[in-house]
Every structure is written in C-alpha cells, then in structure tokens.
C-alpha cells in the first residue's frame, strides 16, 4: 500500500453543464466498484457563466484489500501532481493549465474543442476569438497525453448533457480502475434521463477509445479540420454557378442561400449581379486569376452579410422559428411532462420603427426623437416582454416576421442599398485599375458588424475610407494607397472609440472623421439631507 498513490482528477465544466452530476457519477461508480474515493468542489466564476471545478481522488486498491486501513485523500489539486484534467471547453482547459495544475510528464488531458466566447472576445471590432490551434498547442506542450474532441457535438447527437459524454471519455481513457459496465450500471439508475445519458456516455467512450487504438490519427484529430464537422453547403443553382469560377462556388452558395432566406430569390439575384460586377473588374486586372479571385471571394462574404442586415423583422423571424424552440428545449433539458415558459425582452426605439416606414415618414419620426434628446430627454424606446411560448406572443412575432415583403419599402432598406452601392462602386473601380487597392477595399467589409451604434460606426468608418483614402490624389503610387487603406482598416478594428483610426487617417494625409454633435444633459443635484 505504501507504494500506491491516489489517482487525481480535476473536472472543469461551465455553469449549467452538470459538473456536479459528473462528480457524483464518478464517486458512485468508484464506490460501487469498491474503491476509496473522495471529491470536493471548488467554487469560482468566469466571464461566460459560473465555473465550478471539482477535484476527485480515487485510490486504486479495493477497500477489501486494505485490511481495514483507509488512505488519506487530498482536498485540492497540487501543482504539477494532477493525473487527469477533464474539461468541456477549450479555453477553460488552457486556463487550468495556466494555473500550473497540469504537467507534461504526468497529466492526461481530456478536453472538448467547443468554445464559449468570453466577454473580451465578443467586444472586439474584428474577429476577437482566440486562436484554436494555439490553444491546442498549449495542451500538447503541457500534457503527458491528450484526447481532444468535440464534446458539444456528441452531446447534441445524444440529446443529453455534456457530463455524460465526459464520463464516457474518462472511462475510455483507462485512467481509473473501474470497467465500462460499472459506469453504465450507475447511469442506468440515474432516473428518467438514463437512456440519453447512456447514449452520450457511449459516444464519448467510443471517441476516446478510437483515438487510443489508432494513435497514428492523433495528429489529424488535433488539427482544426477535425475540430467539428463542416456544415452542409447549399447547392448553388446551375445558371448561377456557370457565371463564376469553381473555386468561388462554395462561398457564393452560402451567401445566395442566406439572402433567399432573408428576403427572396430576387434579392439573392441582386447579390449575384453585384458579384458579377466585381468579377468582371477582377478579370480586367487579373485575367488568369493568379490571385485566386480573392477580391470576389471577399466581396461574396461581406456583401452577403451587409445585405442581410439585422432589423426588427429579422429578429422576430429568428425568435419565432421552430428550430429555436427545439434548441431551447434541448438546452434546458425539458421533458415531455415539463412546462416551459419562454419570454423574450425587446426595446425597439425610434430608429427601429422608422426603418420600416417610407423615407419621408421616417425622417419625421427621427426628427421628433432628436428633438426629445435635445430637450434633455432620453431617446424614445418601447420596452416589450413577449411570451414566445404563448399563442399571442408567437402570433405577434410571426406577424412581424411576415412584414418581410414590405422591407424594400422601408427607409432602412433604401439607405443600406445606397451605402452598399457606394462601397461596391469603389471596389469595382479600384480593382479594375489596381488589384491590391480593390482587394483592400473589399476587406473593409469587415468593418460592418453588429447592430445599433456599433453598426452605424462601422459604416461611417468604411465610407470615410471610401470617400477619402480611395480617391485621394496625393499618393505617389497605387501601392501606397492600398497600404494606407490596409492601415486604416486595421486601426478601425483595433480601437472601438476610433482614435487609432483618426490617427491613421491623418498620418496618410486625409482628414480625420468629423466629430459628431452630442447633446449636453444637465442633471439636478440631489438635495442634501440635513442631519441634526
């Protein structure tokens, strides 16, 4: 017994993922198999949801063989002394590694490739996501062995919680002395969700078992291509496919399908006609397509996203879809006998309502709201709480979604199309004259993102680049212009406030963005209570 050491595991799950349930399953399995076991929870918080880690120690000698002795088990993981780190989220795995728990000579890491984006990742103007391959490299460098798989996808397939999949991964790893049948016996007694838990367990077990028995595929499993199965690409209509090189078909098919769903086939055809203008300009400057038609590719992506701009019609459509209700049912694990009520909160303001009105009426509504603000009042908004589970609530959302046919009559639609045409004309003209400049302007489509003030700020930034850098005549050559546009785009994505962009604009000889007038609001000083 003196030479035996407890097997230590640190279990990490985000809030609501069943980390406590997983710990209970492991404890019950170990006890059922006759092994000493102890588990403790370590409360904590995270940027995404609550995060509680669970520390578990199992002594690999049956109680009946200890001659009445009892091992002393620890309450907290010792740095570098951890036998296994199990996590349901990739960045959480790396966070625990950064705390010194894992070691390259001892620790087995079982991790999911799934991500729950942090607040800082979501706040970035550009793509703020952490590099997944970099996180995987850290796991490789700080683990004795590792099995990385998409637990979220396996959970979805099984219709269960991720803790069941994690249990299967632990069982298949061979780290603990219990057999598969002993784990499954505990799951069979877990209540009404036993069958779903067993399905998730089996999927997790088989996935890790396959990695263990086929070591030659470990390198392939850890590459981004194996992180998650690619979504099925919709078929591009044959007449449309004939207009573009084959290398562009996939990205254009995605954009085309998005716009058919967003508005209709005629709107998607308008997207195709715009892309044809870009392709014609690119063929003029690069007839052989030696650059892979990169300008058309970028425009296919960012143009589709801009044309499918978010408005209250789009929000109502997404909120009232059957697929959304099914997803919520799965997330809350609601059974057939459970009663689920779902409320959506909205707060549309004057701009959202004005967007659906003809331009003349919209201007009156916006002018009225500006007058309120100048008078010291807050912008008008209508707080709404809609029960999506109710007939009235669903009818309200579906009725609003059916206004899609009226969208082209609204002021927002006209404004967005005019801005798109301005950007499109700049890209087409620049590409035909100097390919790198057109490519940089196409990449500026990344600036259009989000909604509300974020979306407006992105459009202002892009149009300022188009109206100044793209047409300025002080550049010595077009390569200098392309470099200036690239610098401005990177500056706009790096700084939400826009100060970095203004500095980049001035540095390259064009004016900074105009300062927008902001009303001054006077606040009454609260009365001071006199004390005797």
Image: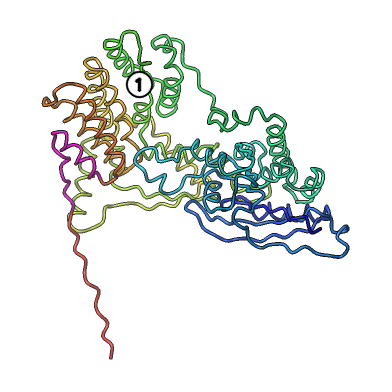
Q: Nearer the viewer, residue 224 or 8?
A: 8
Quarter holding the C terminus is bottom left
Q: Residue at x 39, y 12 (%)?
A: 244
Q: Residues within 10 Å of mark 1 (few under 14, many from 20)?
A: many
Q: Residue at x 26, y 18 (%)?
A: 435
Q: x and y percent of residue 341 in the render? A: 56, 51
- Asked if 265 appears above or below 511 in the picture, the reply is above
Q: x and y percent of residue 375 in the render? A: 18, 57
Q: x and y percent of residue 139 in the render? A: 56, 42
Residue bounds of the magenta highlight? 498-518
Quarter holding the N terminus is bottom right
- Asked if 107 appears above or below 36 in the picture, the reply is above
Is 206 positioned to the left or the right of 522 in the image? right
Q: Nearer the viewer, residue 143 or 158?
A: 143
When asked about the image quadrant of residue 126, the answer is top left
Q: Is residue 103 within the magenta segment?
A: no
Q: Nearer the viewer, residue 358 or 332?
A: 332
Task: Give the structural element (helix, strand or loop) at label 1.
Answer: helix
Q: Label 1 belongs to which residue? A: 271
């Amino acid at each position: 017994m003196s030479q035996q050491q407890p097997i230590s595991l640190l279990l990490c799950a985000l809030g609501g993922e069943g980390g406590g349930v997983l710990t209970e399953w492991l404890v019950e399995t170990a006890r059922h198999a006759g092994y000493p076991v102890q588990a403790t929870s370590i409360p904590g918080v995270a940027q995404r949801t609550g995060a509680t880690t669970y520390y578990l120690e199992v002594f690999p000698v049956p109680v009946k063989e200890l001659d009445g002795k009892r091992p002393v088990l620890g309450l907290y993981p010792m740095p570098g002394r951890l036998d296994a780190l199990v996590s349901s989220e990739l960045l959480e795995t790396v966070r625990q590694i950064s705390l010194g728990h894992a070691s390259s000579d001892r620790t087995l890491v079982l991790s999911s490739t799934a991500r729950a984006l942090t607040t800082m990742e979501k706040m970035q103007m550009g793509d703020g996501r952490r590099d997944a391959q970099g996180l995987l490299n850290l796991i490789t460098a700080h683990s004795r062995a590792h099995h990385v798989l998409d637990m979220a996808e396996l959970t979805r397939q099984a219709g269960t919680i991720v803790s069941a999949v994690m249990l299967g991964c632990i069982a298949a790893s061979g780290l603990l002395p219990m057999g598969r049948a002993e784990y499954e016996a505990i799951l069979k007694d877990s209540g009404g969700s036993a069958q779903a838990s067993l399905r998730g367990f089996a999927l997790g077990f088989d996935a890790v078992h396959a990695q263990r028995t086929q070591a030659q595929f470990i390198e392939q499993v850890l590459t981004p291509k194996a992180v998650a199965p690619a979504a099925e690409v919709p078929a591009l209509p044959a007449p449309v496919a004939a207009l573009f090189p084959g290398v562009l078909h996939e990205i254009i098919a995605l954009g085309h399908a998005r716009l058919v769903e967003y508005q209709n086939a005629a709107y998607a055809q308008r997207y195709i006609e715009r892309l044809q203008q870009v392709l014609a300009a690119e063929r003029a400057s690069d007839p052989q397509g030696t650059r892979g038609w990169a300008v058309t590719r970028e425009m296919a992506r960012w143009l589709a996203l801009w044309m499918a701009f978010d408005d209250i019609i789009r929000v109502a459509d997404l909120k009232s879809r059957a697929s959304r209700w099914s997803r919520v049912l799965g997330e809350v694990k609601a059974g057939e006998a459970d009663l689920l009520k779902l409320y959506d909160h909205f707060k549309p303001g004057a701009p959202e309502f004005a967007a659906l009105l003809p331009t003349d009426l919209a201007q009156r509504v916006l002018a009225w709201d500006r007058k309120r603000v100048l008078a010291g009042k807050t912008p008008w908004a209508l707080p709404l709480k809609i029960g999506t589970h109710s007939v009235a609530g669903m009818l309200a959302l579906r009725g609003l979604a059916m206004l899609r046919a009226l969208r082209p009559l609204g002021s927002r639609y006209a404004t967005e199309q005019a801005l798109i045409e301005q950007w499109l004309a700049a890209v087409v003209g620049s590409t035909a004259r100097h390919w790198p400049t057109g490519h940089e302007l196409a990449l500026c489509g990344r600036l259009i993102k989000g909604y509300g003030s974020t979306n407006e700020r992105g459009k202002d930034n892009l149009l300022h680049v188009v109206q100044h850098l793209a047409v300025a005549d002080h550049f010595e050559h077009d390569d200098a212009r392309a470099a200036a546009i690239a610098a401005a785009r990177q500056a706009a994505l790096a700084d939400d406030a826009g100060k970095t962009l203004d500095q980049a604009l001035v540095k390259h000889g064009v004016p900074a963005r105009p300062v927008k007038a902001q009303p001054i609001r006077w606040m009454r000083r609260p009365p001071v209570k006199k004390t005797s």
